[in-house]
Amino acid sequence: MKHPPRRALPADAAELTRLRLVMLHSAGILPPGPWSAECERWFADRLDRDQRFAAFVIDDGAGRLVSCAVGQYTDRMPRPGQGPYVGHIASVATDPDHRRQGHARLVVAAVHDWLTASGCGQINLTASPEAEHLYRSLGYANVAGPAPMTWSAP
């Protein structure tokens, strides 16, 4: 049974770090050992205190995360017809044993919805070649090449 996305809590920091490592390894990036502890502390701190940061996750019901996506937003200069913030989606990862089940779509959509509800009139992300079709299907389009992609409110 597929669990719905939920907003991550500081207690999810270790699992978010594990999934971030899955994503980085898929890109051929192998961080040094101490990096994991630093990343875990960073996630726990942001999830606890930063109102402009959120992660949405799907768990397996037993405390292990199977998919995640992270969002954050910053102020932007005033622009006619745009919200006061620009958002960024990052660290989209799904455990290899749970891929091709729609989890990434659900967590990305949850982050996207949170960012737009927070006032983001533009949301940026960088797409891997494997995920580009997912982001296009959610309304993201090229701005200046195959990646990065940007979504803008109509």
Image: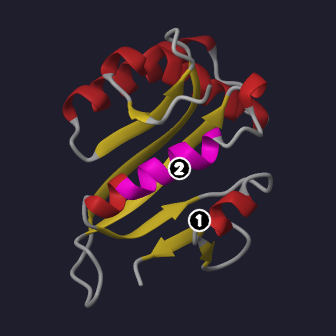
Question: Residue at coordinates 25% horizontally, 90% vertically from top-left?
Answer: 80
Question: Residue at coordinates 36% horizontally, 49% vertically from top-left?
Answer: 72
Q: Determine contact: label 1, label 2, CB under 8 Å.
A: yes
Percent x, y of residue 67 = 59, 31
Is most of the magenta stretch helix, strand or loop? helix
Please give the residue where the numbered disc 1 appears in the rendered image. 138
Q: Nearer the viewer, residue 83 or 144?
A: 83
Give the answer, above or below, for where 141 lies relative to 96. Answer: below
Q: Which stretch did the figure color magenta?
A: 103-113
Q: Quadrant of residue 46?
A: top left
The amino acid type found where label 1 is placed reads Leu
Percent x, y of residue 30 = 72, 25
Give the answer, above or below, for where 58 lies relative to 81. Answer: above
Q: Secondary structure at mark 2?
A: helix
Residue 66 left/right relative to 9: right
Placement of the N terminus among the 4 image quadrants: top right
Question: Residue at coordinates 77% horizontally, 23% vertically from top-left?
Answer: 97
Please give the residue where the numbered disc 2 appears in the rendered image. 108
Placement of the C terminus among the 4 image quadrants: bottom left
